[in-house]
Amino acid sequence: MNSNYPKGPLCQDESVVLLDRKDREYLARLDRNRPIAIRGGKIAVEQLIGRQEGCVVRSSVNEPFLVFRPSLPQLIPNLPRNAQVIYPKDLGPILIWADIFPGARVIEAGVGAGALSMTLLRAIGGTGELVSYEIREDFADMARKNISKYFGPAPNWTLKIGDVGTDLVETDIDRIVLDLPEPWVVIESAWKALKPGGILLSYLPTVIQVKSLVDALREDKRFACIETMETLMRFWHIKGMSARPQHRMIAHTGFLTAARRLAEGEKDIPRAP
């Protein structure tokens, strides 16, 4: 997958996802010099290059697989990583509640494996700009590798090693998206970086962290429209006459808290009790 959304026949160096008869997913890269080892068999890449998405191939042990370019919901959970990724069920709401748009200038902090970075790059398009801050070099290195391998060239992406709370220097920013354990320490630098009306959105795993952030934003008074939400996702099993919820669901993963920056010199209006 890359920023040009490839179409047509599968090509050398592209990423693909293979699905077996139980819909288990296997992420692979098309390299003519390296067969795909999968479930005790191998698939020669020459079987795939030049064919269309949705084709069926068989491994050396005669097991069939469907082959597609990976969609984001297929790619993200299968990314190589050394930290927990933000899963697709939260990536969609992040794009909506942060109001990410083509051409936006976006700051991201906490890149992990690069899942959110790729999602933001797709949303802002070639005319937008993404600047990512990460304090850990190993996480930054993993994100660079994943974006290069599974997204492609991203000349409008800058990755900085630094603490967004103290090192943020950009101004005139449309949106800031944080995946950090203590986002309340970024409020001051976020206010300076954002345009009036700009959106600050934070992803947090626990309600204690959310409470600390919301309290800090309300005490600061330079942000309004403060909202917190979570998304729960439940798949269904449909087979024959049976239609029931799957036994396992994707329940709590994280909370999203969004707020909007006020104009210079303005304070949030008093809230009704």
Image (tube, rainbow, N blue to C red):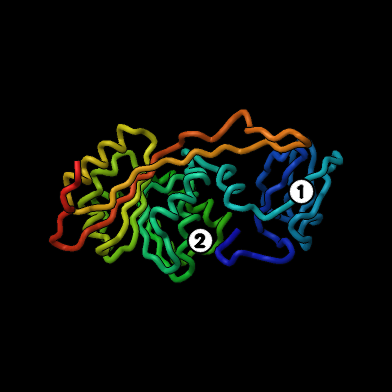
The answer to whether residue 93 shows anywhere in this view is: yes
Image quarter of residue 42 = top right
Q: Say which amino acid is labelled 2.
A: Arg
Establish if 103 lies above or below 75.
below
* Residue 259 locus on image (x, y percent): 29, 51
Q: How many marks?
A: 2
* Residue 172 locus on image (x, y percent): 28, 66
Q: Residue furthest left?
A: 265
Q: Nearer the viewer, residue 193 or 99?
A: 99
- Specify the label residue 122 is tagged with: 2
| 10 Å crowding of disc 1: few (<14), some (14-19), many (20+) | some
Look at 82% across and 49% down and name the residue there: 57
Nearest to N terminus: mark 2 or mark 1:
1
Q: Residue furthest right?
A: 62
* Residue 125 locus on image (x, y percent): 48, 66
Q: Is residue 265 left or right of residue 64?
A: left
- Specify the label residue 24 is tagged with: none
Tell me the quadrant of the picture where the N terminus can be found.
Answer: bottom right
Q: Secondary structure at mark 1?
A: strand
Q: Residue furthest bottom?
A: 127
Q: Is residue 84 left or right of residue 70?
A: left
Residue at label 1?
A: 66
Q: Nearer the viewer, residue 125 or 248?
A: 248
Q: Secondary structure at mark 2?
A: helix
Image quarter of residue 207 = top left
* Residue 4 locus on image (x, y percent): 58, 67
Q: Is residue 174 left or right of residue 90?
A: left
The answer to whether residue 135 shows anywhere in this view is: no
Look at 27% across and 36% down and name the residue there: 211
Q: CA distance from mark 2 to mark 1?
A: 25 Å
